[in-house]
Amino acid sequence: MPAIPTVDDFESDVVTQRFDDMVNPPGLTNFLGSAQVDHDITGIRSVNIAPYSHGDTITGVLSLDGRLFRSFGVPVSMRWRPDRVTRWTQVGELAITTTTVMPREIAGVVVNIEVTNTSEHARQVCLGLSVASTVTRAADGWREPSPPAEANDLQAGPGRAAVIGRARTSAAVTVQGVDVGGARVRDRVIEVDARIDPGQTYRFGFVHVTDGNDDGALAAFDTAAADVPGLVEAAHTAWNRTLRAAFTPGNDEFSGHLPVLETSNAALRRLYWWGAMGTIWFRRDNPASVLGRVYDTLMPRYWQTTTFIWDFSLSSMVHALLDPVPMRRQIEHWIALDIHRHFGTEWLTGGPAGYWYSVNDYAMTRLVRDYVRWNGTAGFLDVELAASDGPRRTVAEHLREWATAWEGFRREHALADYGDIDNLLECVSSYVHEVASLNAANVWCMRVAADVAELRDDAEAAKDLRARADALLTEVQQLYVEGRGFWHARQPDGRMVPVRHCYDFTTVGMTVGRDLPQQRRAEMVDFFVRELRTPSWMRALSAYDDDASYSVRPDHQWNGAYPAWPAEAGRALIELGRADVVADWLPGLARTANQGPPGQAHFVEEAAEPVNGGARKSPPQFPYLIDWACSSAGSWAALVVEGLFGVSAELDGSVSAAPQLAGIDPEARLRNVRVGDRLVDVDAAGVVS
């Protein structure tokens, strides 16, 4: 098995649907923007390449001899790869296969369409594509879940089998058409008449491009339409080049690289690559970005051009190793804003997006620590940056402020009150106010701040921070539900509400797990195995929790889990002393890495039929509201490197390893782990060389 993956290694299992089943269709990116294939055989939707957007408009919808293709009710099968989505179906005697790609350097999408006559007689067929255009160029950033759109005026393209859509109130144009002669434009439908002999295939291409004016859009259309099959192959080549670069020291695509994993364990390899791809997938090299290269959080339906602090931090190790230059720029940008007033930033303007997420202080501490320790950049802690609400201070001082910000959130009790549902998990109504997770994280953050103080020769501050952390840990443990393995959320009136949520399990386990009494650690693991873990995924909330009836949004409820939660649960299990539970779980989890990058949530097996044994991606429509991919995927690579290999890079530049690979692969090895300016190898025995 190759140590560096190609696009073929990521090829998904086949997903088949009929009419709007519980399926989230695959997405694509060319690092400029993103798009999604629709439920039919040719259609595409959410073609959004900033600064131009279409919202979630669907276009390129197929008809056969004037009849809408979807009305035939035939199943459509889909398979994803990083470079393409392939769809196929059979309508009577016609077999149809389409290949959709987003070419690099072109602001658009192409669909290569092949129609094969499987009968014993010639067929004459009219192939129609219905187009829609809502392109716009928003004057401000995209600060809503769905990108903006506006009404367009449509007309036939001059000298082309195409339709031009022009925004009515902004400078935005789209051109959509086909690449063959003899086609005709009828209102918003482009039609091609094809005579197909027995056993023969008719090919044509659909092209969708955007620009700010007619000349630019028409030129882009002509470039793409000149060789649609060639663009399909070029996407394949480009993606393989990107994957090779991601694991190669000194490459020309990233400012760092990821370690190469050598293992005979297919599940371990698959999950590591899943985490790598799931982060690379969100790279955006769009000239419209005021922040340069950025990494989005969701795609292709929601919150494009937005980077959430929380999700970015969950892939922190991958960002630090693979692309530290944009990571540092993003950290500095967030420091310059008030992280207690938003959940992230939008890169068309650089401005804040959304409301405050309570996790932000923990997330920022995690990001700075990972950036410094993996890159050997302790000097970054001395860099002076001004926040929006004060004078220039060193990064170390900002970090200490985040680590102790919880003290300002206390009300009547000793712990921080982290607010209401929207500040926390959004769809678990009981997970509010004084929660165990973030209060335990405060213990960890103060210890990190103490390490930073010690590194900067401030022993007195380090001693004080560690003492305060120890005192807080005692208070956090008051939230534990004795003998049950889960935690309370204390309300402002003092009521203790038991909440069986994985975020307490993962965060408490990862931040203070080794501080807990052995009995509590064992009870937490028992709870996780009994009520949260499933064969190929997990529940975010136990089905026995009183709040399980509140919502069916599967990222944080009983019917599924957000993609980082199983990976972080694995790391918590290791911290709690039960790496054997992770080893037993890996094969099932690896089955879920079979539908492209991790979705914003996957259903547990009881909620939706698995896809070839893997937990099915949850759909985007109400009430689920789940996007096809989420950038916190890097947590899976961290599970392998920091969890199972136990690699620990410290702020002072030292590195050690305490692998937990028994029963997984005693011969596994990580090569070219970058720690500062050194490259080290780590084997399953913990030898760092």
Image (tube, rainbow, N blue to C red):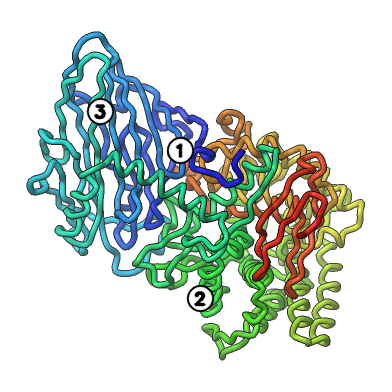
Q: Quadrant of residue 246?
A: bottom right
Q: Quadrant of residue 123?
A: top left
Which badge, 3 or 2, is on the more N-terminal residue?
A: 3
Please give the name of the residue rendered at 19% of the width and 59% of the height, measured from the top-left corner: 216
Looking at the image, do the residues carrying marks 3 and 2 touch, with CB atoms under 8 Å apart? Answer: no
Q: 14 or 611, which is in the foreground?
A: 14
Q: What's the mark number on residue 563?
A: none
* Residue 545 relative to residue 147: left or right: right
Q: Give the alpha-carbon distance from disc 3 to disc 2, as whole Å.
A: 49 Å
Q: From the image, which quarter does the N terminus lie in?
A: top right
Q: What's the mark number on residue 80?
A: 1
Q: Mark 1 vs mark 3: give the one in front.
A: 1
Which residue is label 3 attached to?
Answer: 68
Q: Mark 1 vs mark 2: give the one in front.
A: 1
> Callout 3, which amino acid?
Leu
Does residue 610 lie above or below 515 as drawn? Answer: above
